[in-house]
Amino acid sequence: MTMLDDAPRPIPDAKPARPRVVWVILSLAIVFFFVALAGGSFEGKLGDVQKNDNSAFLPGSADSTKVSNASQKFNSVQSIPGFMVYQRTSGLTAADKAKIAADAVAFRSPTQFNGIAVDEVGAPQYSRNGSVAAISVPLVGKTGNTGRTGPQLVSTEKSILTAARKGAPSGLAVHSAGAGGVLVAFIDSFNGLDGSLLLSAGLVVILILLFVYRSPILWFFPLLGAGLALSASALVIYPLAKHNVITLNGQSQGILSVLVIGAGTDYALLLVSRYREELHEHQSRVEAMIAAWKGAAPPIAASGITVILGLLCLTFADLNSTAGLGPVCAVGIACTLLIMLTVLPVLLVVSGRWIFWPKRPQVDHKSDIATTHGVWTRFANAIVRRPRRSWGIGGLVLIGCVIAITGLKTDGLSTIDGFTTKPDAVVGQHIYDGAGFGKGAGAPADILTNASSLDQVVATIKPLKGVQQSADAVCVQVDYAKLAAVLKADPGSAAQLATSCPAPQLQVSPVNGKLLVTATLTDSYDTQPAYDTVKRIRAAVDRVSGADALVGGSSATNLDIQDASRHDRNLIIPIVLLVILFVLGILLRALVAPILLILSVVLSFAASLGVSAIFFNHVFHFVNADPSFPLFVFVFLVALGIDYNIFLMTRVREETLQHGTRQGIVRGLAVTGGVITSAGLVLAATFVVLGVLPIVFLAEIGFAVAFGVLLDTILVRSIIVPALSYDIGRKIWWPSKLARGAG
C-alpha cells in the first residue's frame, strides 16, 4: 500500500453536487429577476381590477346577493344611491335655488355626464329651515352584467361635484353624500396607494435597517428584494383578479404591500445574518453563501410555507373579500420566498464584502462569539437562571392584557365612521342627516316576492317598526325606463310622483312570476337600527305563506356581510390553528414544542386584542371595529408570529444536536435574538404604516398586528418560550429521539 493509498478520498458526488446547486440557484435567480421586472408595469394596474362594492364581496348564497342579481331583470341599470347637498347656514337665496334647479336639469341630461343613472335623478328637496337642499343623483353601478370600475365611479362623482360647485353663488357650500358618495370616497382613499403607502413603508424599513446593519449600503438589498417580490406578485395577481379567479379590493392590496415588504425584510435579515456569520469562516463568498443558505433556507422556507398555508385557510370564508385576501397575500409570500432565496443570495455574493462597510466581515473564525458572548448571551443566561419566574411573570403580563378584551367592540362600523379623516362625502352626509331629510331615502330595502303574494307582503311590511309611514314608503319598484318617458312628456309630474307609489303603468312588470318591492327605512342604511329593521322585515315576510320573499338592498347587504364575517371567524380560526400545528410538528419532529408555541402565540393574540380595545376606545376614539377584525388579526399574528418561533426553535434544535437541549436553548436565543428582534421591529413598523390610509379598518389592523408582533417578539419569543422550554428540558422534543438525549 502506498502513501497515496492512505490519502483521504473525497466523498463521492460531494463536489459535483455543489456546482449543480449553485447553477440551479443562479438560473432561478435570473429567471425570477426578469419575471419581477416584467411585473413592475402591473403594479399600477391593480386598481383597475379592484372590486370595492359591498355586493361583490358576498357569496351567491346570500339573500341580498340573490335579490341584487334578480333586480337586474327588472331594471337593466343597477344604481348606487347618492346625493348632492347644498348648504347656506343663513338660508338659501333665490340665486342658490336657481343654481340648484339648473343642476337638477343638468344631471338628468344623458349627454352631459357619463355614469349618472339619469332616469333616477330626483327633484330638489329643501329642509324645513330652508338652509339645505339635496338632489338625488344615483351613480350607475352596473349595466346588465357589466359593472363599472372604481376609477370610473370616482371620475363620475368628481365630475358631478365639480359641475355642482362651478358657478355656485359665493357662500353656497356643495358636498356629495349618500352611499355612492361614501363608496367613492372609500375607493378614492386608495388612490396613490403604491405611492404614499410604499414610500412610507420603504422609509421606515430603511431607517430600521440602517440601525440594524450599521451600514449605509446593506439596507438596499433587502428592500430591493422586497420590491422585486411585490412586482412579481402583481404579475400573478392582476390576471387572476381581472378574470374573477380571486377578489382584489383596496384593503387587500394595501395589506399585500406591507406584508411583502415586512416578511421579505424579515427573510432577508435572517439570510444576511447567517451569511455574515459564514463570512467569518470562509474566504470564498460562494462557499459562505452556500453554508448560510443551508442554514437559513429551511427555517425561511418553513416560515413562508406556514404563512402561505395559514393565509390559504381564508379561502374557506363565505365573504369573497376575505376569501380573496388569502390567495392574494399567499401569492405575495410565495413570490417573496422565491426572490429572497434565489435573487437576494446572488446579489449579495456578486456585490462582495464591501456591502457590509464599515464593518466588513473577515475570515477570523469568530462566528461562534455570538453564542458565547455579547448582550443576547447575557440576556439568555439571565432568563434561564430563573426560568420559572421568567415565564411566570411574562404569562401574568399577557393574562393582564387579555382581561381588557371584554372592552373590544366588533359590531361593525358605519360607512361615515369608517374614515380616520373627514372626506367630502362624510361632511355632506352629516349635513344631509342634520337637515331632517328622510335618513333612509335613496337606499331602501328591496323585497323580491312572488307576484301572487304582493298585497299580503306589502301589508305585512308597512306597519313594521323602522319602516317609514308614508304613502310612498312601501311600493312596487318603479320602471325607470317608463318613468323617463313620462317625465320627458310632462316634467311637472316629478313632484307628484315623489309623494306616492308609482302608478301601475309605471311599475316594473313581473318576471318569472316575481315582483320587486322597495321599502324606505327610517334610519340610515349603514346603521344598526337599519339592520334591525331588515331582520324584522325578513322575519315578517318569511311568515307570509307562498311568498318565497327575499330581502336585499344596501342595509341587507351590510348585514349579510357582518353575518358572513362572524361565520368566517368561527370557522377559520380553528382551521388555521390545526394547519400550523401540523406544520410545526413536521418541522420540529415533536409534539410538545408545537403545542407550546401555538398556545403562546394564541395568548399573545388575545393580549393584543385586549390592548387594542383600550387604545381604540380611549386613545383613538374609534366608534367600533368590523366583525372580521379579530379574524384578520388572528391570521396575521399567528401565521407571522409563529415565524419568529420557527426561526428560534429551528436554531435551538440545530444547537441541541451538538450541545443538548438546555444549552441549545441558550445558544439558540443568543444567536437569533438580535436578528429576530430586528425582524419584529421591521414587520411591526410596516403594519403601522397602514395608518397612512384614512380607513379605520386598516388602521385598526395595523395597530393590532404591530403591537402583537412586538409583544410576541419581545416578550413571548425572547422570554416566555425560552424560559418555559428550558424549564421543561429535553421533554420539549417529545416524542422524538431528542427527548431522550442530554439536557
Image (tube, helix red, strand yellow):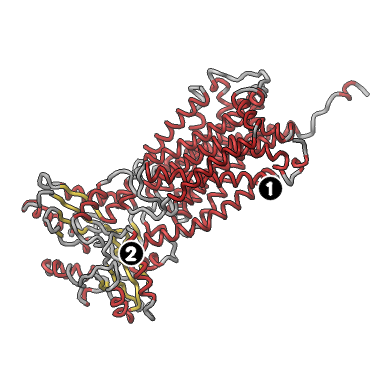
CA gap, disc 2 to disc 1? 50 Å
Can the viewer see residue 152 in this picture?
Answer: no
Can the viewer see residue 583 in this picture?
Answer: yes
Within the image, what quadrant is residue 275 found in?
top right
Residue matched to label 2: 553
Left or right of 127 in this view: 27: right
Looking at the image, residue 508 lies above or below residue 423: below
Left or right of 596 in this view: 189: left
Q: Position of residue 543 (x, y in %)?
A: 38, 77
Within the image, what quadrant is residue 437 found in?
bottom left
Q: Position of residue 629 (x, y in %)?
A: 44, 50
Looking at the image, residue 357 lies above or below residue 267: above
SS assignment at label 2: strand
- 643 or 73, which is in the foreground? 643
Looking at the image, residue 90 lies above or below residue 517: above
Q: Report the residue at 43% width, 50% height from top.
A: 408
User: On the rendered image, what quadrant is the N terminus found in?
Assistant: top right
Give the residue type that dot 2 points to: Gly
Give the residue type that dot 1 points to: Leu
Q: Position of residue 423 (x, y in %)?
A: 27, 46
Q: Report the residue at 21% width, 70% height from top.
A: 470
Residue 603 numbered tag: none
Outermost residue, right side: 1
Residue 591 numbered tag: 1
